[in-house]
Image (cartoon, rainbow, N blue to C red):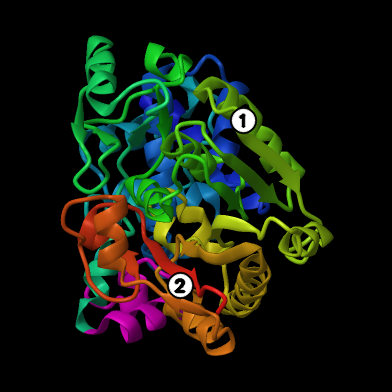
Amino acid sequence: MKAGARLQTAIELLDDIEAQTGKPADAVLSDGFRQRRYAGSKDRTAIAETVYGVLRRRAQVDWWLSRSALPVTGRSRVLTYTALAADEEGARALSEFADAGAYGIEPPSAEERAWLDGILGHGLDHPDQPPAIAANLPEWFAAGLSEQYGADWQRQAAALCEEAPVDVRANLLKADREAVAVALAQEGIETAYCALSPVGLRLTRRRPLRGTKAFKEGWIEVQDEGSQLVALLTHAQPGMKVVDFCAGAGGKTLALAAGMDNKGRIVACDTSEHRLSRAAERLKRAGSFTVERRVLSSARDKWVKRRSGRFDGGFDRVLVDAPCTGSGTWRRNPDQKWRIGENDVAELTALQSEILGSAARLVLPGGRLVYATCSLLKAENEDRIEAFLAERQDFFRFPIEDVWAEAVGGTCPMTGGALQLTPADHGTDGFYCAVLGRKLVN
């Protein structure tokens, strides 16, 4: 594909993302590329970079568009972003885009041409942009980040606009980290050991993995380093009974099974049958055969009540990876920051407390309840734990450095009651993790 045709495809896909509000951007792009099989790997990479560039910098792009007479559309956003961030390739794309006859593209109007000529290479930043615009964040979230991080909030925000790395977890049921690194290198994929996770590898540059021998044979799972650490901090040991209460497609379930060496029992729960069904193939490929998948009607499904009252006393570990804003993953999912509003946070925090309270019933005395989110907001994290502990006197909090020492090893990146990873400070997705214990019955 020529550069101008790539630009047109980016416009079409951005319009699709805007129209399909219930579907994540990566899924829309995946569907769009399947419909455009003529696009080669380099074409897809260039198109995706443009689409994600617009989504990450949308606030600035729209601020610039507000200074023009152009309507805010996928077309005006892509053209404006390309002109402002123009390098040699971007300038060529705009030039080819203007050559409409070759690609069947609607030619730029006189108004569009004048606008693009006026801003070409100017850069996205401008001193007149309000702080939230400059940070490319919704105003309500920028205010919360500022309150939480003080003068450091803009550095934290800037990291959310960067491209996220690709991390993989070595599946210890089949291979150790060293063997995985060698296997990937033999296929031309260079990696480095993750800084914090003892089972993690980070690709030195983005490469497709599904066709590799390591992936096909279940040696690896694509999983952010922060997510790996949450599973490790759950400290599920061989022979234990474990619940992954909000398992989704099973990423952390797989990590728990590997840590338990396929000895014991894991129940992977979720309210979405579709999400749990996606875990089946992954579990088979990974060689995890101790996992039971269970669909719940809600956080207070009758199964929870039945299991909490069983003679065998519940579960040794209960992991609650709660639904949240996902703000810690906005590097990967920049479309989500424009789909979440302040009112959604209030609904989510109420749901998080409900889930935490219900899941706690499954923890046996002497067992542990692990609460995690991929959020940066205190309201979804520390506030939820403090509220829970105020109500439940039979639970206490483990110092995170103590759990780290026994479950991960090495030096914990922080001390105190919980782990809060951020892209700016740790290079991982933003993850919060608190480990609670249930007191033994006297």
Q: Nearer the viewer, residue 117 or 180?
A: 180
Residue topped by disc 2: 138
Q: Nearer the viewer, residue 328 or 127?
A: 328
Quarter of the image with the N terminus in it: top left
Q: Is residue 105 above or below residue 408?
A: above
Mark seen at residue 282: none
Percent across and percent down for residue 323 are 59, 62
In this rendering, position of residue 294 left or right of residue 338: right
Percent across and percent down for residue 286 are 50, 24
Percent across and percent down for residue 164 are 32, 46
In this rendering, position of residue 323 left or right of residue 311: left
Q: At x 48% / y 52%, what residue is drawn?
A: 76
Picture quadrant of residue 180: top left
Residue type at tag 1 = Asp
Residue type at tag 2 = Pro
Q: At x 47% / y 70%, what residue is drawn?
A: 437
Q: Are marks 1 and 2 in contact (CB under 8 Å)?
A: no
Q: Nearer the viewer, residue 27 or 121?
A: 27
Badge 1, how many Cα within 10 Å: few under 14, some, many 20+?
Answer: few
Q: Is residue 11 visible?
A: no
Mark seen at residue 31: 1
SS type, badge 2: loop
Quarter of the image with the C terminus in it: bottom right
Q: At x 66% / y 72%, what residue is drawn?
A: 351
- Residue 130 covered by magenta stretch: yes
Region rendered in magenta: 127-150
Which of disc 2 and disc 1 is earlier in sequence? 1
Q: At x 23% / y 72%, what residue is drawn?
A: 415
Q: Is residue 37 above or below residue 116?
A: above
- Residue 26 covered by magenta stretch: no
Q: Is residue 307 above or below residue 5?
A: below
| Residue farthest along the front direction in this orientation | 442
